[in-house]
Image (spheres, helix red, strand yellow):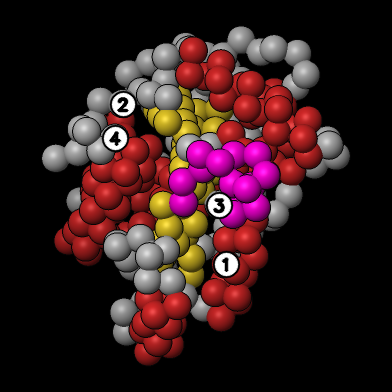
Amino acid sequence: MKTLVMANQKGGVGKTSTLVHLAYSFQEKGKRVVVVDLDTQGNASYTLASFARDMRSSLLFHAEAQKMPEAREAISVIPADASLMAVESLPRAEAQRRFRQSVGKLAEAGYDVCLVDTAPALGIRMSAALASADFVISPIELEVYSIQGIKMMLATIFNIRRECNSGLSFLGMLPSRVDSRNPRHKEHLNALQDAYPKLLVPVTIGLRSSVADALASQMPVWRIRKTAARSAAREFRALGEYVFGKLYPGEAR
């Protein structure tokens, strides 16, 4: 099983919309997908509510071994719950150990890919997710605060890789919610390309109302029957192809 984490300590940068569309993309490619929502805001849990299983994500941090829901053809979602807040009081190493064990049990349950949505904070839950992951991607908004914050996020990822997960692969920063008409966004995108030429995902996700419409309707944007949704659909399709190729290079078209 491949485990991919969405991580950025700043909220509102497109983590959940990225995860939701990747979940649908992988499922359409025949992969058995489990989504783990570690963000108490529960946005991914809401959008994918029809796929929720009879388990809550805080249980993935329990000391006692948990029985995992068996994989199925449809997406499976382990929703967020309020008890996740208590996870932040666990010792970091213990939380990492427990979550890593749970991820291993999800693999035994027959899933092909695990997508993890994290809270917008550099806390215990994010640390545990990164310590258990094979891959991480960081959506980033092209605003000053988001760009400043990504430096801390990158430091966290590289520290986790050095300390406890040498196999963690950083797929890159994903420019998200990009307004092509905003000169500031263009300037910041150019600056990121100059500063981090090898750390940017070669796909840009635009700022489009059709994405919000899709999430509110609990479906991927390519199922929205509006002309305005076509550009967003192409972007998320391209992202899905890129990420799939990174996780499954032998199966990519």
Whether residue 166 appears in magenta in the rendering, the answer is yes
Q: Is residue 144 left or right of residue 219?
A: right
Residue bounds of the magenta highlight:
157-170
Residue 7, which numbered label?
3
Q: Earlier in the sequence, mark 1 or mark 2?
A: 2
Q: Earlier in the sequence, mark 3 or mark 2?
A: 3
Q: Residues within 10 Å of mark 2 (few under 14, many from 20)?
A: some
Q: In the image, what residue type sits under mark 4? A: Tyr
Whether pointer 4 and pointer 3 mark residues with C-beta atoms closer than 8 Å, the reply is no
Residue 248, which numbered label?
4
Whether pointer 1 and pointer 2 mark residues with C-beta atoms closer than 8 Å, the reply is no
Q: Which quadrant of the figure has residue 21?
A: top left
Spatial separation of the CA atoms under disc 4 and disc 3: 21 Å
Residue identifier under label 1:
150
Above or below 197: residue 144: below
Query: Which residue is rendered at x = 24% and y = 46% of the image?
Result: 241
Q: Residues within 10 Å of mark 1 (few under 14, many from 20)?
A: many
Q: Earlier in the sequence, mark 1 or mark 4?
A: 1
Above or below 184: residue 155: above
The location of residue 141, given as percent across then percent down, is 48, 70
Residue 238, which numbered label?
none
Q: Quadrant of the C terminus?
A: top left
